[in-house]
Amino acid sequence: MHIGLFRERGGDRLRAGVVVGDEVADVTDRLEALGPAGPAGLWQPVIEDPSAIDLTSLADGAERRPLSEISWDSPLPRPGKILGAPANYRAHVAEMGNPNTIYEWGMFLIANSSVIGPEGTVELPYTDVRTDHEAELAVVIGRTARNVPRSEALDHVFGYTALLDITVRSTEDRSTRKSFDTFTPIGPWVVTADEIPDPNDLAVRLWVNGEPRQSSTTALMIYEVERLIEYASSVMTLYPGDVIATGTPEGVGPLVNGDRVVCEVERIGRLEVNVSDRHAKPYASREGEAADASV
Ligand code: MN
């Protein structure tokens, strides 16, 4: 099942939808009857407990609208946490010029306030420092996970989506460089795990203005999905609705004003966003000042 959040064209209210062919079934009222929206939004009660509702019949009888008449928002507007995997493809490790992988780096956190949805706009922060695209498969946690061995890891997955891990190439910690508002496009929907037989065998591609920039497969991840969950859950408890960005393959490159970015993950779909520099400032004008080495 493809589940997401949408607005009717010109409408303000965020609604929950299930994709049925070229239509979306509006299941907002049914989800609201299950319980309050949580960090994962309207879908929280279902992500926490899929047995709370019969997913296969959820869309039966629901009002439908053509996909051409709606706009998708991020399916997970404010995840409890977003964990990132650095250096998880050999060819990307090579292009970044540092041999370390997760074993040395660990994983990093991205602020959930950086999430935007399809057709959102990535706002470049700086006029003179490179900001890169990173196309990634994202894992949506479905069951609380703590010290989960890799053999049981996939039992804790609700589904998968596409994610862009937008990154400033500067000296700050990753959590700063990847957490600017608008830096984490997620979507267009979440595909439930039953429709992804092997998350470690999905093509990941990215185009900028129609030009191919990244093309690889999750089969080349250094830490596959099971190991990422094993590693992450050895450090911190993963909760339903948390997101793991699985890392990006080679081909990362700078974004500039006016770019149109398309990130495609096989079996999931296409996440498309725009890029703007309307709020960009010179890097030297950022908040703060250099440490005084004489003190
Ligand atoms: Mn990344």
Image (tube, rainbow, N blue to C red):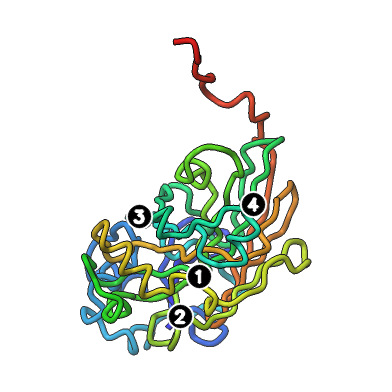
Alpha-carbon distance for marks 2 and 4?
24 Å
Alpha-carbon distance for marks 1 and 2?
8 Å
Task: Give the quarter of the figure containing the N terminus.
Answer: bottom left
Q: Are marks 3 and 2 in contact (CB under 8 Å)?
A: no
Left or right, residue 121 beside residue 32: right
Q: In the rendered structure, which amino acid carries the disc numbered 2? A: Pro
Q: In the rendered structure, which amino acid carries the disc numbered 3? A: Lys
The label shown at residue 199 is 2
| Residue beneath the point at 70% across and 51% down | 255
Q: Quadrant of residue 40?
A: bottom left
Crowding around mark 3 (Cα neighbors within 10 Å: few <14, some 14 to 19, many 20+) is: many
| Residue beneath the point at 30% across and 76% down | 150
Residue mark closest to the camera, 3 vs 2: 2
Q: Are marks 1 and 2 in contact (CB under 8 Å)?
A: yes
The label shown at residue 137 is 1
Q: In the rendered structure, which amino acid carries the disc numbered 1? A: Leu
Q: Position of residue 81 (x, y in %)?
A: 35, 55
Alpha-carbon distance for marks 3 and 4?
22 Å
Q: Which of the marked residues, 1 or 2, is nearer the chain's N terminus?
A: 1
The label shown at residue 132 is 4
